[in-house]
Image (cartoon, rainbow, N blue to C red):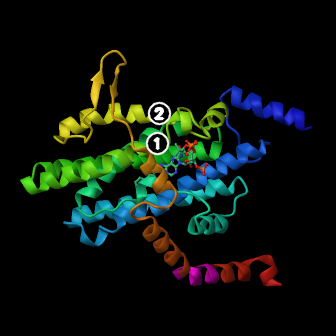
Amino acid sequence: DTRETQAHFERTIGRDQRIEPRDWMPDKYRATMVRQIAQHAHSEIIGMQPEGAWITRAPSLRRKAILLAKVQDEAGHGLYLYSAAETLGADRSDLTAKLISGGQKYSSIFNYPTPTFADVGVIGWLVDGAAICNQVPLCRSSYGPYARAMIRICKEESFHQRQGYELLMTLMRGTGAQREMVQDAVNRWWWPSLMMFGPPDADSTHTAQSMAWKIKRHTNDELRQRFVDMTVPQADALGVTLPDPDLRWNEERGHHDFGEIDWSELKRVISGDGPCNAERIERRRKAHEDGAWVREAAAAYAAKHSDSGRE
Ligand code: FAQ
């Protein structure tokens, strides 16, 4: 009976236990999970493009091997997450169609260009750093398949963050021009990285409900603050300046204060008007269309080997 299943759901959440695919869940919980997991999967897949552009131009065999491994990891995360969305009844080809048509979102951060190799390092340091900050608490998210996927994903993101930081340390030990290249990339990526955490809590549509359902464990602003506090000493160690004159330690709060984020920029980029939105989607659409023959061949093969195919 519905009231009993609803009570079971509430009890499971209340006890910090996991909701599993076969459990009853409110329609809105299911829709929220599909939305977040699909956006997350799309981000991983679109997120291959900015750095992928440097694979053929990496400055050494070692850098190329590292970058190739990292970009392949992102593909793996995307596939993992699409599988998690499927446990909720979502259809993968439908999700891809929605990404390409603009019906579903992906992270704003992947709509910025990567003009220099220092961008590869800064994406690893700041973008993967922000991703870790956001995703480690998601290992305790209430939906079982999503939370479990996060464990492996976070381990791989940690490798990504370290390779980025190590790349930047190498550049900082290099020539003046190399150090300038790093500082320029930091100047371009710092604010967009802070925007990855989403709108401020007061403007966040989903935070209250997602916190109540323990899908999210912290608010957008809490995680953004954690990221700033974590990153400032890393910037010092690296010898770069974060481009915010208002950034300073606040003894009373025990946190860093930081300047006002340009929320109109986040809105613009989310609504499709960032520097690379059109290019990213077009590339994804073309890759999908170019892969049509593989899907057709796989479907024909599967049909041939299914029971109906054998009749
Ligand atoms: N970009 O009410 P909220 C990675 C949307 S890391 C675009 O606060 P919520 C690793 C939001 O969807 C990046 N849209 O929403 C990697 C909602 O719109 P809707 C991916 C954004 O869900 C590294 C509206 O604004 N990580 O890929 C953004 O409670 C390097 C209102 O926002 C994840 O997806 C944004 N930045 O909180 C790969 C983590 N922020 O759906 C390659 C999982 C907000 O109503 C290379 N997701 N919106 O139309 C989350 O933790 C949450 O979904 C948040 C947003 C925190 C992103």
Q: Are marks 2 and 1 in contact (CB under 8 Å)?
A: yes
Look at mark 1 in the image and give the residue it sits on: 197
Q: What span is in magenta? A: 290-297
Look at mark 2 in the image and give the residue it sits on: 221
Q: Position of residue 27 (x, y in %)?
A: 77, 46
Q: Is most of the magenta stretch helix, strand or loop?
A: helix
Q: Position of residue 136 (x, y in %)?
A: 48, 38
> Which quadrant does the C terminus fall into?
bottom right
Q: Position of residue 161 (x, y in %)?
A: 33, 47
Q: Please tell me how crowded label 2 is: few (under 14), some (14-19), or many (20+) other residues with Cα within 10 Å.
A: some
Residue type, numbered disc 1: Phe
Count of numbered labels shown in the rendering: 2
Residue 291 within the segment the image draws in magenta: yes
* Residue in the image at 19% along x and 36% along y: 237
Residue 95 relative to residue 248: left or right: right
79 w.r.t. 168: above or below? below
Residue 252 relative to residue 289: left or right: left
Question: Residue 53, located in which quarter of the rendered image?
Answer: bottom left
Q: Please identify the residue farthest to the front as the structure is shown.
A: 264
Residue type, numbered disc 2: Asp
